[in-house]
Image (cartoon, rainbow, N blue to C red):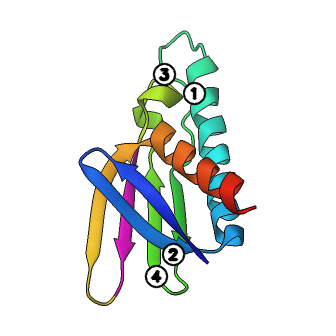
Amino acid sequence: MAQLTFNLPTGSARVELSTIEAIAIQKALAGLLESLKTIAKQTVPAGRPTPQPVFEYRQTDRLFLEIFCNPNLYPSPFAAKVLLTIRDTQLRLTVETDLTQMIEDVNQFVEAHA
């Protein structure tokens, strides 16, 4: 177990994760990124791309960790925001952060601990 730091717009949050859990988050975020790229590439005459499913990742072992995003709200992956919720019995933190920053944080963790 190691500490994954999420760099947030107004601070940071650390959670204890295994490398396996971090890789699962990394893969899930890669899927979200692909959905956002699909939306960005679509050119539809009526101006509306085909809707993509809402992204939701949950880890509920020792700590509740949820990452949520509606990819249909953003014109590109670089504009996308995710809602991060970290919760245990005494604390609940919910904050919106940039998808690109979250991907970078998770990638750095996996590289350092793989």
User: In the rendered structure, does residue 83 fall within the stretch colored magenta?
Assistant: yes
> In the image, what residue occupies the spot 52% across and 49% down?
105
| Residue 91 image label | none
Q: Earlier in the sequence, mark 2 or mark 3?
A: 2
**For the residue marked with disc 1, what is the amino acid?**
Ile
Q: What residue would you read off at disc 4?
A: 63
In the rendered image, the residue lying farthest to the right is 114
Q: What residue would you read off at disc 2?
A: 16
Left or right of 73 on screen, residue 38: right
Give the secondary structure at mark 4.
Answer: loop
Disc 2, disc 3: CB below 8 Å? no
| Residue 39 image label | 1
User: In the rendered structure, does residue 100 fall within the stretch colored magenta?
Assistant: no
Residue density around tag 2, few if under 14, some if 14–19, many if 20 or more, within 10 Å = some
> In the image, what residue occupies the spot 76% across and 61% down?
114
**For the residue marked with disc 3, what is the amino acid?**
Arg
**Magenta span covers which residues?**
82-88
Compute the Cα span from label 3 to label 4: 38 Å
**For the residue marked with disc 2, what is the amino acid?**
Glu
